[in-house]
Image (cartoon, rainbow, N blue to C red):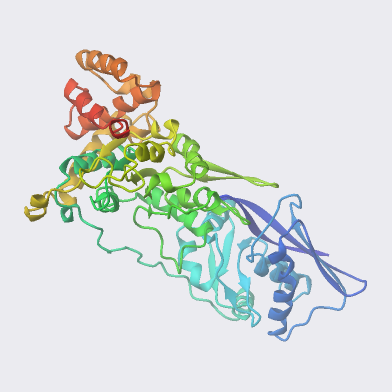
Amino acid sequence: MISSTNTVAFLGIHVLKIKIEVQITSGLPSFSIVGLGDKAITESRERVRAALHSLNLHLPPQRITVNLAPADVFKEGTHYDLPIAMALLSAMKIIPAETIKDFIMMGELGLDGSIRSVSGILPAAIEAKKEGFGFICPEKQGSEALWAEAPHIIAAPDLLSLLNHLKGEYHLPSPQPINFSDHTALPDLIDIKGQESAKRALEIAAAGGHNMLMIGPPGTGKSMLAARLASLLPELSKDEMLEVSQIYSVAGLIKEGHFVSKRPFRAPHHSATMASLTGGGTKARPGEISLAHRGVLFLDELPEFNRSVLESLRQPMETGFITVARANAHLSYPARFQLITAMNPCKCGYLGVFGNECAKAPKCGLEYLSKISGPLLDRIDLQIEVPAVNPWDLTKSTGENSATVANRVKKALEFAKERFKETPILRNAEADGSFLEKYACIEDEALKFLQSAAQKLHLSARGYHRTIRVARTIADLSQSDSIKSLHVKEALFYKNPLKKNG
């Protein structure tokens, strides 16, 4: 007789239902697990054995075979402990097979029989709902599973409580939703004095979802500006919240059901490796660009990043997802992030600042800027110079706060949403050439001006469309149905200050 339970394997944030089959036959006592599992699954034998021993249950002195089907899919993680133990208990006639056949279950077993938290509860619970199955998970993650709205969720603290619940001898309390609203105050734009043109560029970036590069000497407020972009962006919708939380669930970053309720802001150090930024490693976990999905990825000291790491951003910036290639699988993670970067004009940081330039100027600037490729810069819509702050600006009253600017951004996004309502596009930065031709609505005079400027400035095709996208966002901020010459002129202002410094 073969007893079985159900669990899942993860392919990125996508899941594949896995059937755990257990057979107990005559022969020399053994306990083997087959089906292409990793070392954590192999070690599951000892955790399951110890957990059953804590219940005064002992494995039969027979041949025990556990199969993870389909057997050609690589499986990893400790969440297979619980379904293996339950299938084994069914094969030992401890629990009727009918009570567990319609559940997907996940959980790591402690040696004392406790059920410990694991990664990927949310996407697994969503799969259970799709299949019409119930879902069994660790007690601390019951509130996380509730978000999937699976038909029957059991959150158990330990193996004994779960067995008694399934037998009807004890009733586990239903998991309760957690009020995960994050009331942490975001940094406010009003804290930044001066830099009015940079603040304007930040508003345009928020309203259109545009990538942005800031270049200027140290201490001019580049990092402060980047940190305040999140305060200008609209709140995550419920669908976006669920989407982002699935990524964090697979990465094991959701603790006790506290979901991601605000747009992510990720700022990896410039020493970050390719795997940490794009995803990968031994378990192909999501990288920083996926953890920044629907939020902001801030790269400070841009030229200090390894060039190959920077070049890896080009594909996800275009497509909105990243593919992690492994020997036995190709995994895809969402990566629809907004890239904000900052850099000094040269290695010493003071190129162009009278009296502070080093002896190598301007050669040091050219060498420093050569670390960033033209194709990557071509994908950054807004490129601005952030000069040193005038001392008199530090004593002046500050400008608008984040709430005021965020209100204009919200109106601009609603204006664009109405225009793109019959398309999959959410923000202007996502519109390509064909969509721009149809929806940009650029006036003839503005188009002639842009064509003339593109020829003089030697804009590439991508740079030409980039200017239209930015101009369309500027028009949205002014609630204009069409792009006027004034909007194009401002969009061209945000074009590559690197060339001026180089």
- The picture quadrant where one finds residue 47 is bottom right
* Image quadrant containing the N terminus: bottom right
Q: How many marks?
A: 0
Residue 101 x, y percent position in the rendering: 68, 62
In this rendering, the answer to whether 126 lies above or below 384 is: below
Residue 258 in the figure: left or right of residue 194: right
Residue at the location (38% across, 21% down)?
460
Residue 487 lies, with reference to residue 97, above or below; the image says: above
Question: Residue 436 vs residue 201: left or right?
Answer: right
Q: Where is residue 458 in the image (x, y as percent from the top left)?
A: 34, 19
Among all residues in the image, which is located at the extreme front?
A: 359
Query: In which quadrant of the rendered view does residue 395 lie?
Result: bottom left
Q: Which of 361 and 489 is in front in this view?
A: 361
**Closer-to-camera residue (458/86):** 458
Residue found at x 14% / y 48%: 194
Inspect this view and state whether residue 240 appears. yes
In this orientation, does residue 481 appear? Answer: no
Q: Nearer the viewer, residue 148 or 413?
A: 413
Quadrant (top left/top right/bottom left/bottom right) for the C terminus: top left
Q: Residue 444 location in percent, x, y? A: 22, 13
> Within the image, what quadrant is residue 55 found in?
bottom right
The image shows residue 101, relative to residue 296, as above or below, that is below
Is residue 40 left or right of 420 when viewed as pictured?
right
Q: Which residue lies furthest to the right in this view?
A: 27
Pinpoint residue 255: horizontal percent, then vertical percent: 46, 67
Residue 474 horizontal side relative to residue 372, left or right: left
